[in-house]
Amino acid sequence: MSQTTSFGNFVLAIALIAPVTTSAQTGQVPKPAVDLKPGVANYRVRFEVVGQSATMDLTRTTKEQNGAWVVNETSTTPQFSGSDETTIEKKTLIIRKRILHDKVIAGELQFRGHNATGEITVNGQKQTINVDLGGVVFADGAGGQDVLAALPLAKGYTAEFRNFGMQLQNVKMLQLRVMGTDTVSVPAGTFNTWKVLIVSLDGGDESSALWVEKRTHRVVKYAMSFPSFHDAVATAELTK
């Protein structure tokens, strides 16, 4: 499946045929099997919507800083640039801080227990945030996909986790499911991977899929579908 449309169809198809199940980890934060690693990953992202397409370069840098992981993602196109940075606890991989900046939203949030505090600016309007999220935020923001790839992936494995949408200030409950294995080829090479599906537990129709190299727990490809936004699809492939 080397074409973007194939990945989009794959995500939608498995979302339809794979029933949402109750995970044994309900109410708990998933426990990683491995820690993150320092390094740089580069992806080429392709967007398709209403017959139009565009590409974007994304660079993800992971480094150790003050006893934690700091993951920074920068995305660039000729018309756009943005950055997303998260501070993540070692071993537990729980997010502690997120700093986001793009054309629409800028903000900095601290996460402690079930609470998120800080300030965000959306379309020039500044807002103070102090909310109880009802649980711990996990695998969100920059490096969120790498955090999911660090879980003990195996056929049939599931996990539930919580994200926080900064722009809409909404909590999103998600479920990860390992669907099986797949061999995929991207510019960085050919890899033996786990196919991982992420779906909403809140009734949303968005879904995403990750292809995680078994040997290194590295995300070599991912795809996201947005049926409510003109069936838009975004696909990213590891380039180096």
Image (cartoon, rainbow, N blue to C red):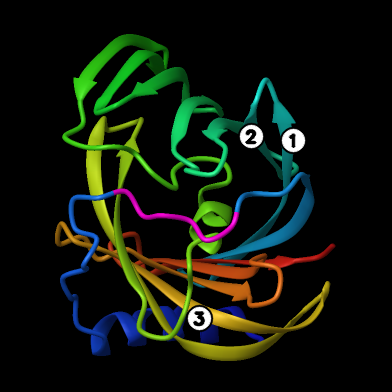
Image coords of residue 78 (percent x, y): 75, 42
Q: Pointer 3: residues within 10 angstroms few (<14), some, or many (20+)? A: many
Residue 197, quarter of picture: bottom left
Taking the image as shown, residue 139 lies to the left or right of residue 89, namely left
Image coords of residue 175 (percent x, y): 29, 64
Residue at (73, 59) in percent of width and height: 43
For marks 3 and 1, give the one nearer the viewer.
1
Q: Amino acid at mark 3?
A: Lys
Q: Earlier in the sequence, mark 2 or mark 3?
A: 2
Residue 49 visible in the snapshot = no
Residue 168, quarter of picture: top left
Image coords of residue 84 (percent x, y): 58, 33
Looking at the picture, does residue 219 appear above or below residue 135? Answer: below
51 or 212: nearer the eye? 212
Residue at (83, 72) in percent of width and height: 188
Q: Mark 2–mark 3 contact, CB under 8 Å? A: no
Image coords of residue 54 (percent x, y): 64, 60
Per the image, the residue denoted by label 2 is 69
Q: Which mark is residue 233?
A: none
**Residues under labels 2 and 3: Cα distance?**
25 Å
Residue at (84, 62) in percent of width and height: 240
**Image: magenta residue range:** 29-34
Chief secondary structure of the magenta span? loop
Q: Mark 3–mark 1 contact, CB under 8 Å? A: no
**Residues under labels 3 and 1: Cα distance?**
26 Å
Per the image, the residue denoted by label 3 is 195
Looking at the picture, does residue 36 appear above or below residue 131? Answer: below
Per the image, the residue denoted by label 1 is 63
Q: Earlier in the sequence, mark 1 or mark 2?
A: 1
